[in-house]
Amino acid sequence: MDDGAYGAAATPYETNLSDVADGTADPFAPYGAEGSYDAGYPGDGGARRGGARGRSRRGRGADSGRGRRRERAESSAEDGGATSSSRAEKGEPPRDPVEQARAICLRLLTGTPRTRKQLADALRKREIPDEAAEEVLSRFEEVGLINDSAFAEAWVESRHHGRGLARRALARELRTKGVDVTLIDEAVSQLDSEQEEETARELVARKLRATRGLDRDKRLRRLAGMLARKGYPEGMALRVVRQALEEEGEDTDFLGDEGS
């Protein structure tokens, strides 16, 4: 299972988010601008396409170039809405920082749960004032739209069963996403050594056929290296690979006690 599948494993986030967007569980005042915020995209594109039909080829080319530049600028905005320059061109006043932070977070949480740090980093990148960012992030935590504990548990479940990652690799990934070490320990404790070893055996069994025809040492390095990259302890990796090779009639006495 890849990262996309991970997003599907966290459906409760989408339910809470829709409640917020509908105003039934809104952490702030009802946000009527969100709908128009989304709707502006296809409407703007339609207007550009419609206006282009009656223009000369040269006019169409110039308008198309401007449209592409604008679309690139808009796609780079993490909140998915109009850029500051486009709002200024339309004569619109700057958006309230809290309102903007809320829109950015709702956009990023749509379909994919994220950690508090991931959202905080996105708000900082968009130059949202710290006070506004803190207000939004804290409120979203209160209503359950940000839940690092649930995120970590779902991540471990998905990445272990989908990608075969061991506890060490899972903990490393969660650290990069800013999850607290206590929550990481709780999440990876779902897996025990027996479960890890069983998964390691399944991984080796799937890879074993592809190594047939290679010399013994090369097979050992490839299989053990594959497990090491997925975070399995060296002793466990060698033991699992040794047993798999022995079942195929390979001599593994050269490993001595390392693979026992």
Image (tube, rainbow, N blue to C red):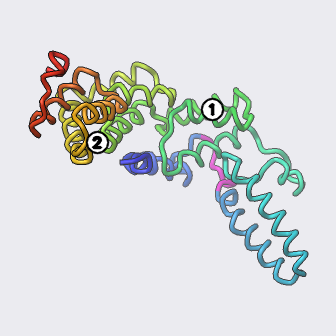
Does residue 225 sit above or below 12 in this rendering? above
Q: Tell me, yes or no, whether the highlighted magenta stretch contains residue 7.
A: no
Q: Tell me, yes or no, whether the highlighted magenta stretch contains residue 32.
A: yes
Residue nearer the viewer, 77 or 56:
56
- Earlier sequence position, callout 2 versus callout 1: 1
Does residue 151 sit above or below 73 in this rendering? above
| Residue that numbered label 2 is attached to | 161
The residue at 77%/75% (across/down) is: 49
Task: Mark 1: give few (<14), some (14-19) or many (20+) Cα within 10 Å.
Answer: few
Residue at the extreme bottom of the image, as rendered:
54
The residue at 43%/48% (across/down) is: 7
Count of numbered tags: 2
Q: Quadrant of residue 13?
A: top left
Residue nearer the viewer, 64 or 216:
216
Q: Mark 2 against mark 1, which lies toward the viewer?
A: 2
The location of residue 171, given as percent across then percent down, is 39, 26
| Residue that numbered label 1 is attached to | 121
Start-end of magenta stretch: 28-34
Q: Secondary structure at mark 2?
A: helix
Q: Quadrant of residue 256?
A: top left
The location of residue 177, given as percent across then percent down, is 50, 31
